[in-house]
Structures are given as C-alpha cells and as structure tokens.
Image (cartoon, coloured by chain):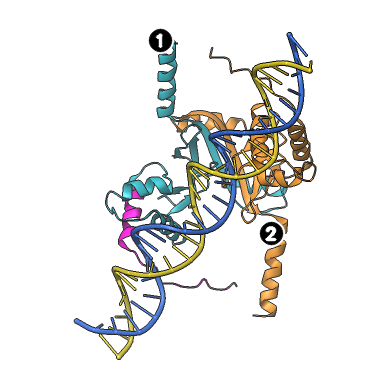
Chain colours: A cyan, B orange, C blue, D yellow
Amino acid sequence: MSDPPPKRRLRMTRQRRVILEELKKLKAHPTADEVYEVVRERLPRISLSTVYRDLETLCEWGKVRLLEVGCAKKHFDYDTRDHYHVRCARCGRVENLPVEPFTYLEQAFRDLTDYEVTGHKLELIGICPECKRKEEEEKKSKEEAP
Amino acid sequence: MSDPPPKRRLRMTRQRRVILEELKKLKAHPTADEVYEVVRERLPRISLSTVYRDLETLCEWGKVRLLEVGCAKKHFDYDTRDHYHVRCARCGRVENLPVEPFTYLEQAFRDLTDYEVTGHKLELIGICPECKRKEEEEKKSKEEAP
DNA sequence: TTCAGCAATAGGAGTTATTCCTATCTTATG
DNA sequence: CATAAGATAGGAATAACTCCTATTGCTGAA
C-alpha cells in the first residue's frame, strides 16, 4: 500500500510516564503549559520542550489525543476516543460532552462538498460555572460601588 | 440592563472599505495574512497591524465574522450569518457548508453540561481537491523514480 | 558488565501569528 | 480653517510553539 512508517523504538521514559499519569488525573483537557505546570511538581528539571515533544510522541503513539479546538492553544486529552466538547468562551477550558458522536453526520454532509471528508468536530460554546460565578460577583460589586 | 458600550464614532476609512471589498470577493475564508496580501495590491502602504485592527473593528461592527476554526490561525468571513464549515486538514483552507445550522442541537445538548450554552460549531475535516491532486502527483512521481 | 549506537533530554534560540505602542496623519464638525 | 477624536504605519513586544545542539541515558549484543 504505502511506505511503512520509519520504525523507531519508542521508549516509555520517566518523563513520558509522568506526563501520561498527570494527564490522566486531570478531568479537563489541559494545554501543554498546564501539563508542564503539574508535571514540574514531580520532575522539577523537566523542560517545556520535552513536554511538547512527549505530548506529540504520545499522540503518534495513540496514547493521548490532540484536540484542535477553536482557539489558539492546543489542548490534550487522555481519552483518545472520538467525542464532542464544550468550551468556555471566557477562559478557554474544554470538557467532554457525554454523548456518542453522530457518525451519520459525515455521511449526510459528504455530498455538500468536494473535499474528501475524513472526520468532523462538534463543539458547544458556553460559559463555564466558574466564569459565570465570577461574572455575577463583578456585577454585584459594580452595583454596590459604582 | 448593563452599561451601554462606550460609543465611539467609527469611520469607514479607505483601508476599511478596501478590506471589506476584498473580503467579499474571496470565496474562501482568508486569514489576516491573506487579506493583507490582496489588499496590498490596492493600498501598497497599508500595514499588517492595520489589517488586524480593522478586521477586529469590522467584527465588532458586525460587518465581518471571525471564525475560530480548529487551527492556530484566525480566519475571517464576509458572511456574518451562522453556518458550518469544512476545513482542509492539509492546507487549512476553510469553506462554507451549504446547509442551515441545526438550532435544535444546542437545546438537545443543554442538559449534558453545566456550562451556560451560547452557541455551537460544527466543522467537517477533510482534504481539499487541490491537496488531493498534489498527493496523487507525489505518489505517482515516487512510483516512477524510487 | 561493558560498550556502541540510537533515543531522549534540558536549555535555549528561532519562528509564527498576533497584539501593543507611539508618533504622525485624517476627517467630521463647529 | 481649527480642533479633537479616531486611524494609521511601522516597528517592538508577546504568546505559543518548534527547532537545534550538546549531553545524558537505555538497551541489547558481545
């Protein structure tokens, strides 16, 4: 069929294991930077570039998934299955939507475009509970002392 | 309700008019950089920062829409109505899907999250005809001279 | 158990896309 | 025409990556 990928022997190093473990613990879908912050508590000498490289490697390896959500930063997910997301328009936080993806959508849309369709993404936009709370606090303090 | 926005008198300057006109001509959904390239042919002294600022202003003004698609760059659209998109996984090009958005989706998903849902985005991923063609050419030239 | 060789790392430089800053220029109005 | 708010060009600054290099660390064959 096509050329076999250059087979390098990937190693489960300490850095990679810790990154994977911490990613698993986080319920949300952190950015590389956020992963770096938590991993640093266990491996203080790890470098940000290692975090980026290892997250990419773990993606290729199929152990982690890269989310290309509608914002500049890359988000990573321990759960590699296809699923939909909610994103907070204020803080950018991303979380899962507990629902099975609609596989029929791609089929239904295939005739609407001359692209060779390979997948789809559905993203709910909203305000997360924390940001909503902050917003209300701000409004209140404004009313009290304008 | 809430504070009225600080009312500044926005001006339809030459730069803004040209940006708007060129954006209207482009069928795809260009990035700021692509807008800059075409606008430069009519206004050679325009600066990239003006393009960014004016695109943002035109968005606030409701004359242009910012698309936050699943890739690092910002894309802009002359058509400000809600609609879905296809994106090329290779080159990042974005185009419209000629279909009415499914307004019921938000309602249906509302109970699945504690976010205050304000919208949703649906994006088909695929390979655009041009990238598909290039891919096939590469494959062919590989077979001929390996 | 040593060692050759590939893989991985830390640290920092480089890149890309975007935003910010400032001195200067425009333009609508009085 | 004066003038003041609004815009602009040009470049510096920033954010989020991505790449480079010298060094370190595994790992499997001898």
Q: Residue A144 carries which label?
A: 1
Q: Mark 2 points at which residue?
A: B131
Assess whether residue A21 is covered by the magenta stretch: yes
**Crowdedness near tag 1: few (<14), some (14–19) or many (≥20) residues, C-alpha within 10 Å:** few
x and y percentages locating residue A118 in the rendered image = 61, 54
Q: Residue at horizontal 64%, vertical 39%? A: B49
Residue drawn at x 58%, y 18% is B5
CB under 8 Å between discs 1 and 2: no
Residue A115 is marked as none
Q: Is mark 1 on a helix, strand or loop?
A: helix
Q: Where is residue A111 in the image (x, y as percent from the top left)?
A: 72, 48
> The residue under label 2 is which amino acid type?
Cys
Which quarter of the picture shows residue B14?
top right
Of C10 and C2, nearer the camera is C10
Relative to B87, residue D9 above or below: above
Q: Where is residue B34 in the image (x, y as percent from the top left)?
A: 70, 47
Pick the quarter of the image with the C terminus of chain A.
Answer: top left
Residue in the picture at 44% in, 72% down: A8
From the viewer's perspective, tell me whether residue B56 is left or right of residue D15: right
Task: List x then y, in percent, for residue B137.
Answer: 71, 68
